Amino acid sequence: MRLELTRIGNSRGIRIPKPLIAQCGLGDVVELRVTPEGLVIAPHRAPRHGWRQTFAAAHPAVREMLLGTVSPNDFDGEDWKW
């Protein structure tokens, strides 16, 4: 799709057609980043979005390690200071 840049004060903007907004899942707030290919407009994601699902899908040994069920070692007992 080819769009023209529209003057908005000292800036320029584009109008994104409604079907593209729906297809991309864009809301009122988006994230904009520069890549070597150009600009990327993406849906805004909350920090740590999807972490819960990723953690739930992890191997049980990984979950146990992250939850602190690993036994303390020498460093924990002797070298660690608060």
Image (cartoon, rainbow, N blue to C red):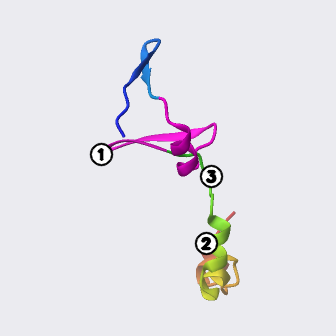
- In the image shown, does 30 or 55 lie closer to the viewer? 30
Seen in the picture, residue 53 relative to 47 is either above or below; the reply is below
Mark 2–mark 1 CB contact (< 8 Å): no
User: At numbered mark 3, what does the secondary structure look like: helix, strand or loop?
Assistant: loop
Residue 34 sits inside the magenta stretch? yes
Start-end of magenta stretch: 15-41
What label does residue 37 carry, if any? 1
- The image quadrant that residue 4 belongs to is top left
* Residue type highlighted by circle 3: Pro
Placement of 75 over or under 71, stated as above or below: above
The amino acid type found where label 1 is placed reads Glu
Of circles 2 and 1, which is in front?
1
Residue at screen point 34% across, 35% down: 2
Work out whether 72 lies above or below 39. below
Badge 2 element = helix
Comparing labels 3 and 1, the label whose residue is closer to the camera? 1
Quadrant containing the C terminus is bottom right
Mark number, residue 54: 2
At 52% from the left and 41% from the top, the residue drawn is 31
| Residue on which the image places disc 3 | 47
Residue extending farthest top: 9
Queried whether the magenta region covers residue 14, the answer comes back as no
- Most extreme residue toward the left is 36
Label whose residue precedes the other's in the sequence (3 or 1): 1
